[in-house]
């Protein structure tokens, strides 16, 4: 079963029976071995995610979050799983945040409810075939080999969950539920949840047993738009994902092929459309369980048309310009002058049965403290993606999900999977995703060429990790344009002449992985940018 001669691990891979693209080689290997043993994409994705929480720790952790999208071949449906924890349920806690702000610098008050465990068990219950113990085996082995103080404690936590699964009578789903219930302290189960709460209390956090026990992974329909014969599927406005859909709607009225890949006209148009879509993201997006996000209006023909007219093909905008989808009007008001790569990693899986998964695990684990308490569960900083602005759709409320940057992508053609993408990089994620999508759809590049092509992005938007209640003060760099240094000097000069504030980067802009499904031949291709430390693995076709 674990015949390493049948594993192809590098930065690109092709197979007709299964591929994985992820952060580390060990995590990619964990996923591909599950596929090799007969597991499906859901099984392999969970194994990969759990391994990433060890190998890519800091970028993601068990205490973090992981939005996941799946195309299920059995039902022929695409769903999103909201692997995102919520703010504390205590109104006293929320009042404290509103008075004092949402702290950073390693303060445990910035941690939401850990969501990775329930995301994994829910994914396996609905779509998987194996046990939690089998999925967690690679992660436990990696933890046993590790040297960090949280590692043996987390290994013991996972082993407790495996033991609970094994001791529980009933179906595989019942056993998976028991493992999850032990972690979250549901139905009076003690142990792990008590350790988590003890850590919160000791470090001054607000999360308690009720927060843990009430956590459930939401299953949702994706937000979709059509573009050049493809259906682009994104998570809802509790992520930044729908602004990619808005951007595609804005640029679909232009002939990008005539402009040419990476020409000054092409880069200028895409960046100007991104600025408009991200302004709407910053103005309107939030947890739809709490706020009415006008997505239908934001994606409508009428609103798209009047917003498209704001794009000046000769001059770069220096203003933040949210529109008014309710009017509709192209501008809500006068412009307001209001990137680095964030702590996130990547996971894509496709199997021989036609199932495809895209996930974006994260946590932004602070440098201190990293002991993880007695359970070894290091925390996320994701409550920093809320704010304390009264009336803002992303203002913190009891039990609210932060509007996160994590934004996996699935793409369908003729109602079947065509592509999957995941990018690490905070506010860069959908900007990089957009470039890769256009590389493939408009210019016919395969995943290896897409992930290694020069990239561009802008910091002309609010900082998704700055909870400052005065939102204009979180605006990063008006008019900015980051370009890969391999983009030609002539193009750089042209863009500068249009008013873009250029920043030339030698380091990768974002960290992408990409997967392509050729429905005619059955070939699966996966690639991750080698300069950004991404990896891909494929099964030998004889499996």
Image: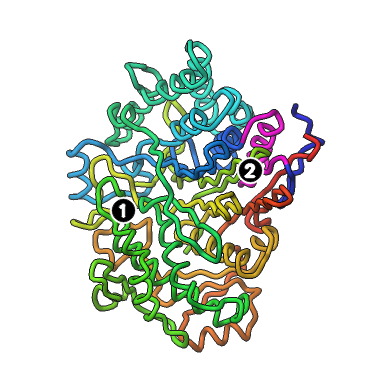
Q: 329 and 431: which one is in front?
A: 329
Vertical placement of residue 280 versus 542, above or below: below
Q: Which residue is mark 1?
A: 286
List x then y, in percent, for residue 356: 59, 44
Q: 89 and 262: which one is in front?
A: 262
Q: Secondary structure at mark 1?
A: loop
Q: Which residue is mark 2?
A: 350
* Image position of 89 (left or right of 27): left
- Specify start and end residues of the magenta stretch as a single range: 17-40
Q: Residue at x 49, y 23 (%)?
A: 157
Residues under labels 2 and 1: Cα distance?
A: 30 Å
List x then y, in percent, for residue 302: 34, 72
Q: Quadrant of residue 114?
A: top left
* Image position of 136 (left or right of 212): right
- Residue 236 got which mark? none
Instruction: State which quarter of the image contains the C terminus.
Output: top right
Residue 452 drawn in magenta: no
Instruction: State which quarter of the image contains the N terminus.
Output: top right
């Amino acid at each position: 079963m674990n015949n390493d001669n049948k594993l192809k691990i590098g930065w690109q891979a092709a197979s007709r029976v299964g591929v994985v693209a992820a952060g580390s080689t060990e995590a990619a290997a964990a996923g591909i071995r599950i596929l090799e043993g007969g597991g499906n994409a859901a099984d392999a994705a969970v194994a990969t995610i759990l391994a990433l929480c060890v190998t890519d720790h800091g970028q993601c952790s068990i205490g973090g979050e992981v939005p996941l999208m799946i195309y299920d071949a059995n039902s022929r449906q695409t769903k999103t799983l909201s692997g995102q924890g919520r703010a504390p349920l205590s109104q006293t806690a929320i009042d404290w945040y509103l008075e004092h702000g949402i702290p950073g610098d390693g303060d445990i008050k910035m941690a939401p409810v850990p969501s990775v465990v329930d995301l994994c068990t829910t994914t396996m219950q609905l779509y998987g075939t194996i046990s939690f113990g089998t999925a967690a085996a690679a992660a436990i082995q990696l933890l046993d080999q590790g040297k960090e103080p949280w590692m043996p404690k987390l290994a013991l936590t996972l082993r407790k969950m495996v033991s609970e699964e094994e001791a529980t009578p009933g179906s595989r789903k019942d056993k998976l539920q028991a493992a999850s219930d032990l972690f979250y302290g549901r139905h009076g189960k003690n142990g792990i949840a008590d350790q988590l709460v003890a850590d919160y209390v000791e470090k001054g956090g607000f999360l308690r047993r009720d927060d843990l026990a009430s956590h459930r992974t939401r299953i949702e329909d994706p937000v979709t738009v059509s573009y050049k014969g493809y259906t682009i599927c994104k998570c809802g406005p509790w992520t930044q994902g729908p602004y990619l859909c808005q951007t595609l709607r804005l640029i679909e009225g232009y002939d990008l092929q005539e402009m040419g890949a990476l020409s000054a006209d092409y880069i200028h148009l895409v960046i100007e459309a991104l600025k408009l879509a991200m302004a709407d993201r910053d103005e309107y997006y939030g947890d739809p369980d709490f706020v009415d996000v006008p997505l239908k209006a934001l994606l409508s023909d009428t609103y798209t048309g009047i917003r498209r007219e704001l794009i000046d093909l000769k001059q770069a905008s220096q203003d933040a310009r949210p529109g008014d989808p309710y009017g509709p009007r192209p501008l809500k008001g006068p412009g307001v002058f209001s990137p680095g790569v964030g702590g996130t990693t990547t996971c894509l899986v496709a199997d021989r049965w036609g199932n495809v998964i895209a996930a974006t695990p994260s946590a932004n684990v602070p440098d201190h403290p990293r002991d993880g308490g007695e359970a070894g569960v290091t925390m996320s900083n994701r409550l920093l993606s809320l704010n304390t602005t009264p009336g803002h759709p992303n203002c913190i409320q009891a039990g609210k999900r932060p509007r996160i940057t994590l934004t996996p992508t699935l793409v369908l053609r003729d109602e079947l999977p065509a592509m999957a993408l995941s990018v690490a990089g905070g506010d860069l994620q959908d900007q990089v995703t957009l470039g890769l999508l256009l590389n493939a759809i408009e210019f016919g590049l395969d995943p290896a060429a897409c992930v290694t092509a020069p990239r561009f992005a802008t910091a002309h938007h609010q900082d998704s990790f700055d909870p400052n209640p005065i939102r204009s003060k979180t605006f990063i760099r008006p008019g900015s344009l980051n370009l890969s240094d391999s983009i030609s000097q002539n193009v750089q000069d042209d863009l500068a002449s249009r008013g873009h504030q250029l920043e030339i980067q030698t380091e990768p802009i974002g960290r992408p992985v990409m997967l392509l499904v050729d429905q005619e031949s059955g070939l699966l291709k996966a690639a991750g940018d080698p300069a950004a430390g991404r990896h891909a693995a494929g099964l030998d076709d004889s499996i």
